[in-house]
Image (tube, rainbow, N blue to C red):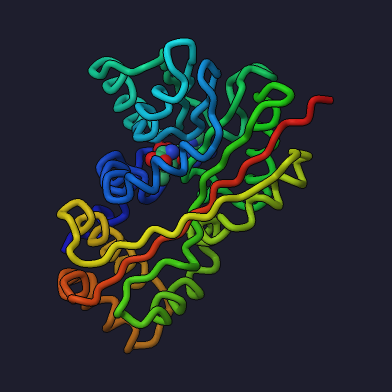
Amino acid sequence: MSNASDSEHITSSGHKLSAGGHLNLHYLALRDEYDATLRAAGIRSGWSVLDAGAGNGVFLPLMAELLGPEGHIEACDLARENLEAIEGLIASERLACPIRARTGNILALPYETGTFDAVWSANVVQYLSDVELTQAIAEFRRVVKPGGLVAVKEVDISVWQYQPQDPKLMWRLLDALSDDVQMSGAMRGTRVSAWFRAAGLENVSAITTLAERRQPLTSVEREYIRNNLEFLSGLARTRDLTEADHRQWKAIGEEPERLIGDPDFCYREMWVLSLGIVPRS
Ligand SMILES: C[S@@+](CC[C@H](N)C(=O)[O-])C[C@H]1O[C@@H](n2cnc3c(N)ncnc32)[C@H](O)[C@@H]1O
C-alpha cells in the first residue's frame, strides 16, 4: 500500500489525481472510450484549438491528427511539471500539427478574445467551485470565435463502482465528502450543460460515456483501478464514517487486489462531453 500523499497523485499546484503518471494510466486504461469522446467533439481539420488544462498532454497526439498540418494547438495548464511533460512530447514526437504550451489558469485565460475555433477541456472543471465554473465557461466563450465550439469533458462519479463491492459503501463515502470541492465537482459532469446555457452558448448538447472493465483486466487497467482504490481508501481515513465502513476501506487500501482479482469484478466510470456553440452575434 502507498502512503496517503502518494495515493493522491497530486501536482505542484495542488490538484489530486493530476500527476503525469496517473494521467497516463487513466488514459491508457480507458483509451478507446477516451479517443471516441475526443473524436465526437466535432473538432475539424485546420482549426486552431485550445486544450485548457491539458495536463501532461495525453489528448494532444490524437487532437493534432484530427487538426492536420493546417491546424494549431495551444495547450495551457497550471502545473509546471505537466507543462514540462508536454514540452517533452513536442520535442520527442512527430505530431501532426504545431503545438505550443504555456502556463495559464482557466479562470483568466492568457489569450485574446476570439482567438480559437474551439476550446477542449477534459477533467479540469471538476476542481472548480460552482462560482468558478461560471467564470471558466465565460472564459471559454470569450476566447472562442463567434460560431466556434466549446467542448468540456467531465467525469460524474455518482456512477463510480467497484463491484462486487456493495456500491453503497462508495455512496456513503461520497456523502461524507460533500464539503470537498473536487469530489463535489466530480459529481457535476452531467450538469455542466446548465452552465453552458447560463453562459449563453447555443446548440447545447451532451454525450455520456459509460466505461466498464471486467476480467480479464490488462496490467494497465489493474494498476489504474488499484490507484483509484488506494486514493479512495486514503480519503476514507479522513472522514467521519462508521467503524464498519472504516474497516472495509482500510482492507481495500491494504489489499486492493482481493477486490480487483474477484472473478466477477466490474469497474464502472462515467463521463459527459458537454458541447456548445458561441453565438454569432
Ligand atoms: C486530471 S488532470 C487532466 C489533464 C488532461 N486534460 C487529461 O484529461 O488528461 C487536471 C489538470 O487540470 C489542471 N488544472 C486544474 N485547475 C486548473 C486551472 N484553474 N487552470 C488550468 N489548469 C488547471 C491541473 O494542473 C491538471 O494538469
How far from the left and from the top, in percent, is residue 170?
40, 75
Identity of the residue drawn at 35% across and 62% down: 212
Q: Would residue 56 appear left or right of 136 to someone viewing this image?
A: left
Q: Quadrant of residue 257?
A: bottom left
- In this view, 243 is above or below 159: below
- In this view, 263 is above or below 277: below
Residue at the limit of the structure toward the right, as seen here:
281
Identity of the residue drawn at 36% across and 17% down: 96
- Depth check: give the residue in front, 168 or 15: 168
How far from the left and from the top, in percent, is residue 59?
39, 34
- Depth check: give the residue in front, 217 or 16: 217
- In this view, 182 is above or below 172: above
Regarding residue 87, the answer to whether it shows in the image is yes
How far from the left and from the top, in percent, is residue 264?
24, 77
For the C terminus, give its image quadrant.
top right
Q: Quadrant of residue 93?
A: top left
Q: How many callouts does the rendering have?
A: 0
Ligand 1 picture quarter? top left
Residue at the limit of the structure toward the top, as seen here:
70
Identity of the residue drawn at 32% across and 89% down: 244
How far from the left and from the top, in percent, is residue 260?
20, 69
Q: Would residue 226 appear left or right of 202 to someone viewing this image?
A: left
- In this view, 233 is above or below 191: below
